[in-house]
Amino acid sequence: MKEILMKAIERALEEGASFADGRIVRRKSEEIYVKNGRPERIEIQEEVGLGLRVIWKGALGFASTNELNPESARETADMAIQMAKGAHNAGHMDVNLSEEEPGKGSFKFPYEKDPFDIPLPDKVDFLLECDRLMNVSDKIKVRESILHSLKEEKLFASSEGGDIEQIITLCGGGISATAVEGNESQQRSYPALGGNYAQTGWEFVDSLDLPANAERIAKEAEELLNAPPCPSEERALIIGKSMLGLQIHESCGHPSEADRVFGYETSFAGDTFLTRDKLGNFRYGSPLVNIVADATLEKALGHFEYDDEGVRAQRIELVKEGIFQNYLTSRETAYKLGIKSGGCARADGYRNLPIIRMTNINLEPGDFSLDELIQETKKGLLIEEYSSWSIDDKRLNFQFAGEIGWLIEDGEVKWMVKNPTYTGITPQFWNSLDALTNKSTLFLLGVPNCGKGEPMQAMYVGHQVPYARFQNVKIGVMKR
Amino acid sequence: MRAKEIAKFVLHNTKGEAQVNVLDYSHYLIRFTRNSVHQSIQERGFYASVKVVMDKRVGEASSNLVDESSLKEMIQRAEIIASLSPPNLEFVSLPKPSPLRFSSIFVEPPSPIEASEIVKSAIAVAKKKSVELSGSLFCRQGDVCVLNSLGIDSSAPTSEYAFRLVATKEDGSGFASIQTYDWRMINPEELALEAVERALMTINPREIEPGEYDVVLLPYAVDEIMSFFGWFGFNAQAMQEGRSFLEGKIGEKIFDESVTLIDDAENAQLPFPFDWEGVPKQKVVLVDKGIAKGVVYDSFTAHKEGKESTGHSMRGVPFPSDMILYPGDYSLEELIGSLDKGILVTRFHYTNIVHPKLLIFTGMTRDGTFFVEKGKIKYPLRNLRFTQNLVNAFSDKVLIGKEAKRGDHSLVPPIRLNRFNFTGISRE
C-alpha cells in the first residue's frame, strides 16, 4: 500500500507539484438496525481507496480513486494536477501551508473487546431484547435500536517525509421509542438521539446498559403525550448531557473553525461571527466559560495521534475565562493566521479532502453537584437530551429543542413538560452562564456524523460536558 | 456499461433471492470564495451492494472494490449475515419487474478546464460590480444498475450539474442557483447577476419586530418546504407508523384548493427512471386541488398494504424526490404586489423539524430577505428565524406563481403564504 501512495506522490511532483500528500484509507463498518421487532437492516460495508492532495503553481487540487495499483496511482496524481490547473485557470486562492515537523509513527488505539469479534446473532438478540422491553403500550408506534461499529486504517504520507499509520476503532448504539396519539407524537431516546459512540471497544456498548433504560424511555414517551407543554417565558435553563454537547457543537465548535473566517463555507454552511478582530479579546461568555478543543482525550471520538495533514493532536483553549482565544485550524488556515496548525484537518474516508473539523470540544466543569444546582434554582427548566437544532449562517441566532423537559420550581424538579424549546443569541447566551457542575457529572458525547463541506463529509467528533445553568433564557418558542 | 457487467456477475454468484446495486461514477467539484477558487476536487469511484434474502432472513453488504474476489467476498458477507439473522416476518418479496416508463437524460460532463471557465465567467460578473462571489460547481455523472433475482433489470446513465452562488458585499448577500442534467444550460453570467443584484439590494439591512407576516417565498425556499412534506408526510412509512400529518386524512381537504402536488420524475427536470430497488418511478398524485390523494411506496411498505411499489425507494425509506407543485397564474411581481405588509424570502438556512406530526419546522432566512409594503420592496431585512406549522400555512389561502425552478427535491414556483410566524432575529 505504501508503495502505491508514494507512487502517486512522486508522480505529482514529476508533473510539477510543489507539494503532495495523500492517504490510503481502509474502512469496515457494521450497522445493525432493529425496528418494531424486526431486523430492518443488517449491513457490513467495506471500502478502500486513495486520496491525493497537490499544490501546483499555488493552486490546490485533489483527486481520489477506489483502485489501488500503480497505474491508478499515476492517473490519480494526474487528475489532481488537472484539477489544480482548473483552479489556476479560474483564478485560485494561493495556498501555503504552515511549517510543521513531518509526523511519523504507527498507532493503534486500545480497546478491550473488538466490536467485530462479537457474534452477529448476539448483537441482533441484544437489540431485539431492547425492542421487546420498549413495547410497553399500543401507543408506542415506533421502536428503534441500533448498533454501529467502525474500524478505520489510515496510511498517510507526504512529499515532506510524513509517514503515519493509525488504526481507529469506534462503536456504540442507542434506543428510541416514539409514542403517537391523535395529532401528538413524542420521542424518547437513550443515551442520546441516534445513540452514543466512543473510540473504544465493545465494553462501551456494555457500559451503556441499553436494556435497563428501554422500558423507562418508552413509558416517558407515552407520558409525554399528555404532559403539559413547555411554558412560553423566560427562565433559568439547566442543560447537560447531549443537549449541552449539541449547544457547544453548534455555537462554539462550528464558529471556531478557521475556514469559516476565510469564507470557505460562505456559500454553503455559512461563516462565523468570530471574526479575526475578535481573537484574544472578545467576551464570548461569562468568566466561568472555559472551552477546549482536545484531540488528546482518549476514548472520545475526536481523539487521534495525527490529523489528516500529519499534524500532531493537540489540546487548544478556544475560550478561556469567557474570552475567545483560538480557532480550530489546518495548515492552510494556520499559515494565513501566522501560527502553527492546531491539527484539526480531518477527512471523511479516502475520497474527501481534509477540511477543518472539530476534535473534542469540551466545556470545563465547575464546583456544583447537580442537586445543588437544582436546589439553587428558583424557576428553571432542565433539559438533558436534544431533539431538534437550528442556527443561523453566522452561528448567532439558535433555536434548540429537547425530547423532554423538567420544570424546576423553588429548587425542586416538579413535573415534565413536552416540546421544550429554547432560543438565544450565542454570546448573550454564554454570557448568561452562572453555574457549572463538577467533574463527577461529566458526560462524554460521541457524535459520529457531524456534516460539513461540499461534498458533504460526515465526521466523528466528541464533546465532554458537565451541566450548565444559563439565566433569563427564552423558552417555549413553538406555537401549535 | 461496466456497471451492468459487474451487477450481472454479482447476481450470478448469489444464491436465492437477491438484489444488486452498482454505481460506477466520476464526480468533480470546484468551490470558490471571495472570487478565488479554494477547492478543486475529483472523485472516481465505484459502489456495489448486494441484498440477500433466505427464508425472510435478509443480509446486506457493500464494497467499493471492483475485482471478482472482492465482489465474491461481499456476497459471502451478505449471505453469512442473512444466515445468522432472525427472519423479518413482514418481508414479502423483492419487487417484480415491469417496464421502465421513460429514460434518463445523460450529458457528458465538461472537462475540468471547461468547468473552470464557467466559474471564471461568473466571478468576472461579480468583479465588475465590485462584489465578492462564493459558490460551487458540482458535476456528477455515472452509470447506475439494479438487478434482482426476480427479473428486475434496470440500468441508466445519469448526469447532474449544480451551480450555487452567494454574492456578498459589506453586510449584504444574495443567492442564486441552478440544478440541471445538462451543464450547457448553465448561464454563469445570468446566474451571477441574479446573486450580485440581490446582494447589492441587501446592504444595510434593517431590523423588524418578529411576529406574523404574509410572505412571498422564492422557489429556493419552497423547495426546502417540499422536503419536509416528503419526509414527514407523503411517504407510506410515515403513514404506516402513524407519524405522518396525513394519517387518516387521505381524501380530505388538507391544503388550499390552489395546491396540487404530484411526484413525477419524468417531468421534474432531472429525469431518472427507476428507484433504489430498480422499480420504475410512477407518477403519484399527492394533493389534488387541496385534497390529500396519496403517498409514495417502496416494495416493503406497498406489500404491507397489498399494493405495488410506486418506485420511490430511497434505500429503505419511500420518499418523493421529484415533487412538482403545479404552477399558478401569478408572476413574481404580482405575488409581491399582493403583499400589503409582508416579507419576501429568497432562501432558508438550517431548517429542522420541531414537531413532526404537526409539521412544525424552524429555520432562518438567508441571502435576500426584504420588507414589502403596499406591493413594493421597501428595504432589506436582517435574517429572521421562523417557527411555523406548515399544514396551517398551506391550508390558508396560497397564491402560486407561474415560473417553476428545479431545486434539490422538487420543481416549484414562488408562492405567497399568509401569516408566517417569525420568532426571532439574527443579531450580535
Image (spheres, rainbow, N blue to C red):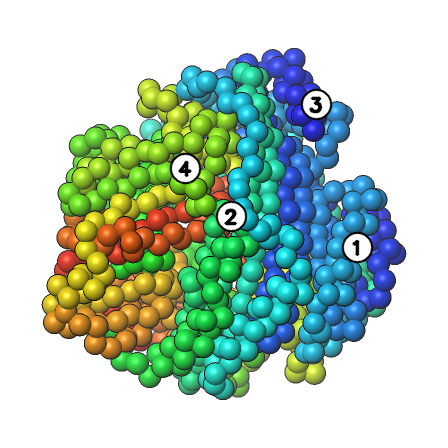
Q: Are marks 4 and 3 on the same chain?
A: yes
Classify B349 as above or below A401: above
Q: Amino acid at mark 4?
A: Ala
Label 2, label 4: how far apart the Cα atoms are? 15 Å
Left or right, residue B186 beside residue A95? right
Which residue lies under the disc numbered 2?
A: A200
Is there any visible trace of residue B152 in the rendered image? no
Which chain is disc 3 placed on?
A
Q: Are marks 1 and 2 on the same chain?
A: no
Label 1, label 2: how far apart the Cα atoms are? 27 Å
Q: Kindly identify which numbered label has been placed on residue B76.
A: 1
Q: Nearer the viewer, residue B397 or A266?
A: A266
Which residue lies under the disc numbered 3?
A: A3
Crowd around label 4: few <14 · some 14–19 · many ≥20 (10 Å): many
Q: Amino acid at mark 3?
A: Glu
Q: Kindly identify which numbered label has been placed on residue A295.
A: 4
* Quadrant, the N terminus of chain B: top right
Residue placed at 79% from the left, 55% from the top? Answer: B76
Q: Quadrant of residue B211?
A: bottom left
Q: Position of residue A222 (x, y in %)?
A: 40, 81
Residue placed at 71% from the left, 59% from the top? Answer: B60
Q: Amino acid at mark 1?
A: Gln
Q: Are marks 1 and 3 on the same chain?
A: no
Left or right, residue B51 beside residue A342? right
Instruction: Kindly state the secondary structure of the residue where label 2 is placed.
Output: loop
Q: Kindly identify which numbered label has been placed on residue A329.
A: none
